[in-house]
Amino acid sequence: MKFLDLAKVYIRSGSGGNGCISFRREKYIEYGGPDGGDGGDGGSVWVEAVDGLNTLIDFRYQQHFFADNGRPGAGRQRTGANGDDIVLRVPVGTEILDEDQETVIDDITEVGQRVCLAQGGNGGWGNLRFKTSTNQAPRRSNPGQEGVERTIWLRLKLIADVGLLGLPNAGKSTFLAATSNARPKVADYPFTTLHPNLGVVGVDNTEFVVADIPGLIDGASEGRGLGDLFLGHVERCAVLLHLVDGSSGTLIEDYQTIIHELEAYGGGLAEKPRITVLNKIDTLDGEERDFLKDELEAAVGAPVMLMSGVSKEGVTEVLRALRAQIDTKRLRERGDIQEAGPWRP
């Protein structure tokens, strides 16, 4: 299944049915009267978050969604049937944007959350509604209200606890493959990751979700490489894991490139809790590890951890550090922490 995180959708709610002009005419009934029924309401367009989806690929093949119109009223005080609603099913984490792609209509963050995007038109009144003591035979009715037509954008921002950052070939996919059952593409050339990957990582009887996004390069905020569009998938993360390739030879420049792109992107990413890791230490000897660690810590201004995704050296310590940064309440709400009950023999 292909990954799609942005989709343009055209929607239209149903129009209300027209009211009816009718008079009661029955044999042996001396006095007839108005008995025209109301029109039915038009169907509405809803968005609902469902479980089991992690992409907007369904909206690649269908972009137009129209709700049913209400049926017109009829004689004998019969009200027209309401039009059926239409529901757009999206994954959790979907943002609904207006046509300008800037105005946020709503943010779907929980399974079962529903948002009405276009309300159906009201049905028109039949002539029975206009009967009064002075106008006992009204010959007027209301037309149904027109439906709402609009264009919206759906943008998916994956909900994960940890977001992986780094240059291409910094070892992000290797780390995800080594710590979870995810199988991202791993190769010895840049940009092997072309779309975000999710993996469930476990440590100390606790599980959390890690998101791997395509690597950033210098100028990503200006559209170079794959750009910074995928940074939206780590906006919701509780902590960022910044992997720096220890074998690159340009350690400090690599680190500063990522920080510069985070600041250029905005969205509060540069202020998020961040753990910096010197990766690929299996290619370094002890003296090189100490030297590069000290050099990177001076640039970061905070402690730096050592890790190798290939040999798994230091991986458990990094996972525990991430676990410590993730809000305990957040994990408990996800059901990944079991409440300790009273001791029983």
Image (tube, grey):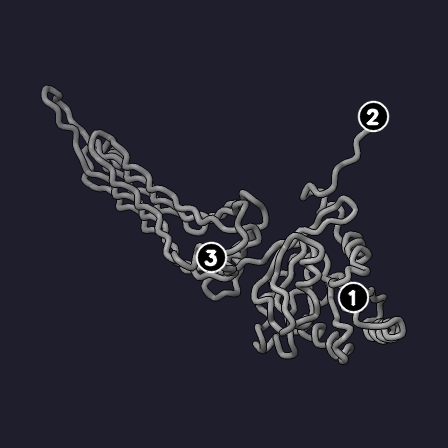
What is the CA distance from the residue labelled 2 to the residue labelled 1? 42 Å
Determine whether label 2 and label 1 are within 8 Å by CB: no
314, 119: nearer the viewer: 314
Q: Position of residue 246 (x, y in %)?
A: 78, 73
Residue that mark 1 sits on:
277
What is the CA distance from the residue labelled 3 to the residue labelled 2? 50 Å
* Type of the residue with mark 1: Val
Left or right: 148 as drawn, with respect to 137: right
Quadrant in which the C terminus is drawn: top right
* Point 42% across, 59% down: residue: 60
**Mark closer to the chain start, 3 or 2:** 3
Residue that mark 2 sits on:
344
* Type of the residue with mark 2: Arg
Residue 57's label in the rendered image is 3
**Residue 135 is at least partly visible in this image:** no
**Residue 170 is at least partly visible in this image:** yes
